[in-house]
Image (spheres, helix red, strand yellow):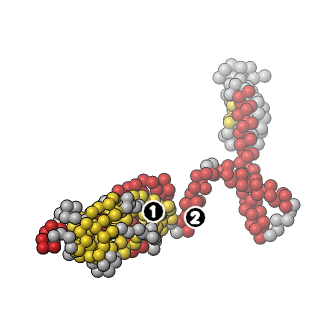
Amino acid sequence: MKLEIIQYFDPTGKELSHRIPETGSGDIKLGAQLIVQENQAAVFFRDGKALDTFRAGRHVLSTMNIPLLTRLLSLPFGFKSPFQAQVYFVNLKTFLNLKWGTKEPVSFKDSELGYVRLRAFGVYSIKVSNPQLFIGEVVGTQAVYATAEIEDYLRDLLVGRLNDFLGETVKSIFELPQHFDELAVGLKSRIADDFAKYGLEISDFVINAITPPEEVQKMIDERSGMGAVGDMGKFVQFKAAKAMEKAAEKGGEASSGMGMGMGAGMGMMIPGMINQAMQDAKRQEAADAASGEGGKVKTCPACKKDAPLSARFCPECGAEFPKKTFCSNCGAALKKGSKFCPECGQKTS
């Protein structure tokens, strides 16, 4: 069959290259019309050699457009007879939304958790940047070459590079979410050469998620929750108050196993909380009284805590202060029977 008009349209949208004719070689007549679409390139082969690569447009196949033919065709034919050749139409569009992900969890040495097994997945896009190199290195003599035939290899290549890049860039999985964009950009740059040697270009690379095992995710959630709580003491007091409120609403019906467990827990916590509150109140009361007396205090002979000058009993231990033992002006200790303070001279009676 003599080919006088050569063109191809991909009905699937998934073909990287398509050979015309699909089997053997075609009898292409000199002067035939080669039509290449805007998103295509046509690589011309004869006798197993790539003669030229044509870009978008209409091309007349002549010795002027294919100079190498002058050395391959004999003069007796006057350059008008058919010749055996093949044309590979290469799709130059960007192939979007190709999936990548780890088939099995990969080990990552975390600075805080030790070795953790991670799964990762995302999407990427590719395009053919060097049609002649792509045909020679990847397609070979295959008539139709689609994305599905190279996706597995590219996915494994991406995952392998991701493992190395993670270990160099991130110290702990707690840092992962904030580094997704940085990892994607860095990894895209690193694998550019791997793709280029096959005549391919990676247009986009997106990391959708990098996930640890479920038990590690729970640890991350707990750590985040602790950060959100802030003051743990106040948080415990708040939870205790809420538990008491719920118990009061139930009106004594908290006899179930859960209710009893919570009640026992609260029963152990509440006395300590009440005692702490009472101690705080006593200290505040003493401080208020002292501030009303110019900040002057006296020391309890029993517990050695400070108390206001006017106090008859110690606010800490409840011990009674002996009458006229301390100077009402400066708080100095008075000897029994003293009529004047030995420190400030204040009359004691």
The Cα–Cα distance between marks 1 and 2, rounded to whole angstroms, is 34 Å
**Observer-nearest of 154 and 328:** 154
Q: Identify residue type, mark 2.
A: Lys
Cβ atoms at labels 1 and 2 below 8 Å apart: no
Residue 254 percent location from the top left of the image:
82, 65
- For mark 2, give the secondary structure: helix
Q: Look at the picture and state if 22 lies above or below 41.
A: below
- For mark 1, give the secondary structure: strand
**Residue at 59% from the left image edge and 59% from the top image edge:** 222
**Image-based side of 176 in relation to 244, left or right:** left
**Residue at 32% from the left image edge and 80% from the top image edge:** 23
**Residue at 46% from the left image edge and 71% from the top image edge:** 12
Numbered tag placed on residue 96 in the rendering:
1
Quadrant showing the N terminus: bottom left
**Observer-nearest of 54 and 201:** 54
Q: Residue furthest right?
A: 251
Residue 121 percent location from the top left of the image:
47, 66
Mark nearer the viewer, 1 or 2: 1
Is any atom of residue 116 visible in this view?
no
Residue 319 percent location from the top left of the image:
75, 41
Residue placed under numbered mark 2 in the picture: 218
**Residue at 36% from the left image edge and 72% from the top image edge:** 18
Q: Quadrant of residue 200?
A: bottom left
Is any atom of residue 63 visible in this view?
yes
